[in-house]
Image (tube, helix red, strand yellow):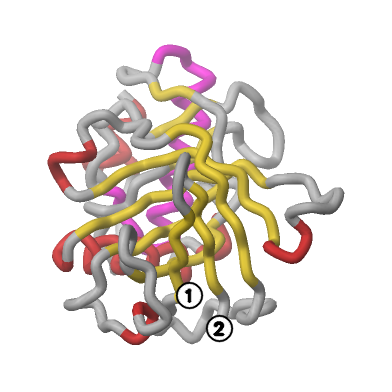
Amino acid sequence: MSTLDIVFNHRVETLWKWSTGNSRFTIADDNQHYIARILKHDINNTSRSNGITLSTAYLTPRMECQLSSTPLPVVLKIATGSEHISLLQREASFYEDELHHLQGCVVPKYYGLYRGKLGSSSPRSHRLDCRDAASACMILEYCSGHGSFPLSSGDFRRRALIATQRLHQAGVVHGDLLNNRHILDLGYNGDKGGVRIVDFSMARRHHRCPQGIGGCQELILIGS
């Protein structure tokens, strides 16, 4: 089973691979082991109050971490407590299912979901179910961009609208795009769009836009 070693300043914690149960998402090597070296912990200062912590890290395969492999910059989204772990599992299921084909162009690339007990690593931790696991960690691509709302430029607004339309075509409505941290401007155009939409904790499935842009409230929000 794949594992993730999270290297904090003075300790190493081990988590175990956790599937959301989505058969459409295939893992190339489920026995691979990774190391995530924390660069900056709790980059979202308000996260402590709601059981979610965001940290930036460098990710490497454990067997290659001492070799020439290039560290991959990632974001670790760590949930603590059964309620927040369940919400994180639900968010990960969007990346594994409806958003799978949009990774790297509309949403960040998704590198998996892990669980265990931060602060009390144990070989038995990976056998805990969602109700008992102390912590879970979702690994996402680090997107170097900034949020801006109202959308500051016509070009950024256009790219954000296209990205939101692609979400809706996949049957997903984000539900919280008023938050200026959830639409990132990566500062370029091209086939990758230059926009990443993040944080699907409030997303809903089975969305169908009413006919015409004017009929969909989320598209009106982005386009106006």
Sequence-wise, which precedes: disc 1 or disc 2?
2
> 22 or 60: nearer the eye?
60
Question: What residue sits right under mark 1 in the picture?
Answer: 17
Q: How crowded is mark 2: few (under 14 residues within 10 Å), some or many (20 or more)?
A: few
Chain part drawn in magenta: 152-174
Q: Main secondary structure of the magenta part?
A: helix
Front-most of residues 90 and 188: 90
Q: Is residue 82 left or right of residue 168?
A: left
C-alpha span from label 1 to label 2: 7 Å
Q: Which residue is drawn at 34% across and 53% down?
A: 78
Q: Which residue is drawn at 37% across and 42% down?
A: 54
Q: Residue at x 68, y 78 (%)?
A: 29
Graded by Cα atoms within 10 Å as few (under 14), some (14 to 19) or many (20 or more), the crowding at tag 1 reads many
Residue 139 location (% of width, % of height): 49, 55
Quarter holding the C terminus is: top left
Q: How many marks?
A: 2
- Residue at image point 28% right, 56% down: 79
Up/down of 5 relative to 129, above or below? above
Specify the label residue 1 is tagged with: 2
Residues at discs 1 and 2 in contact (Cβ within 8 Å): yes
Element on which disc 1 rests: strand
Any part of residue 97 in sight:
no
Which amino acid lies under the numbered mark 1 shown in the image of this protein?
Lys
Classify residue 53 by image quadrant: top left
